[in-house]
Amino acid sequence: MKGLRAVLRLLAAVTLVALTGCATVGGPGTKASTAPADIDPWENWNRKVFAFNETVDDAIVKPLAKSYRDIVPALVRTGVSNVFGNINDAWSAANHLLQGKVGSGLEMGFRVLTNTLLGLGGVLDPASEFGMTKRSEDFGQTLGRWGFSNGPYVVAPVLGPLTVRDTAGFLVDRQTSASRLPDTSGAQWGVVGLELVDVRSRLLSSTQLLDQIALDKYSFVRDAYLARRRDALFDGAPPLDDDFADEPANPAAATPVLPGAKPTATAPTTPGAPTPPSSPTPKTEAPPAPPATK
């Protein structure tokens, strides 16, 4: 319990430092960002935390994940992932209901009930075989549904990419996680470590590919995270941006002009002023008929 609270306090402190602007934007050696300033205003700070996380991952987390993958049988690893997923599904069902999505919330509730009763407490996943789709939702998405803005992007130590809104949601999500079930702090830390290793082991192939293709890993991870969170907020159907509108804002501006034609200028009219008469069209006489031949 004390260890978990310490982690939460550390995360809150990191967010507070970012919000108060203690981290400067840009700096010597900082790569140019493709994101607008309001999305990643603390990029210099975030890059330093990102580099720290990469160091911790290479030295500790990734080796543990590889050992876990190589030593623990796949059936056991699948069962561990299913148990964690079943617990998270219960909180997802609650978030569906909090967002007003009653139908999907009830379906997620039935999914949890099915896996708990028929899946040996969640070790197995019979709900997926019955066609109950897994639709994960967290409190960060619920805050977004309630109208809270995403806020700036921030990289938290160990936790990785977040936004200000997702940081607040994470603090709530952790209160319902599997690590809250044990009574002792040692057992809770053990569950947190198992969660971390389980997630990291399932991402080994993805991160290996990322290391090979990403020219700027920080920007790639940031853009991918923000795009995935936007997609999740709108259930896979985000609205189109204004820059990609199907029709121009001014239809007259899209009227084509023939080459060599002079545009016609229209004089501005004042309300109540008479409309100037249009210039008469010159009449053309028909050519005389040729004389009749006998």
Image: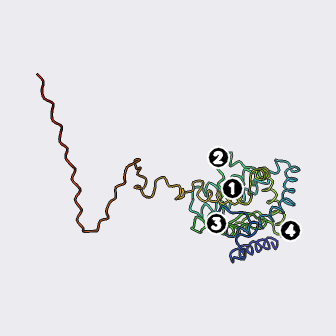
- Whether pointer 1 and pointer 4 mark residues with C-beta atoms closer than 8 Å, the reply is no
Find disc 2 in the rendering and name its residue: 131
**Could you give the CA–CA distance between mark 4 and mark 3, rounded to whole angstroms?**
38 Å
Name the spot of residue 185 as percent of width and height, x first. 83, 70
Look at the numbered discs 4 and 2 and tell me whether their residues touch, using CB distance below 8 Å.
no
Question: How far from the left and from the top, in percent, is residue 143?
Answer: 61, 67
Alpha carbon separation for disc pair 4 and 2: 38 Å
Disc nearest the viewer among 4 and 3: 3
- What amino acid type is highlighted by mark number 4? Gly
Q: Identify the residue position indicated by label 1 in the image.
A: 112
Residue 98 in the image: above or below residue 122: below
Could you tell me how many numbered marks the image carries? 4
Residue 285: numbered disc: none
Instruction: Say whether marks 1 and 3 touch (CB < 8 Å).
Output: no
Residue beneath disc 3? 39
* Circle 4 Cα neighbour tier, 10 Å, few/some/many (<14 / 14–19 / ≥20): few
Q: Amino acid at mark 1?
A: Val
What amino acid type should be assigned to the residue bearing mark 2? Gly
First-in-chain label (4 vs 2) = 2
Picture residue at 24% right of the left edge, 68% below the top: 272
Q: Please name the residue that numbered disc 4 is placed on.
A: 186
Q: Secondary structure at mark 3?
A: loop
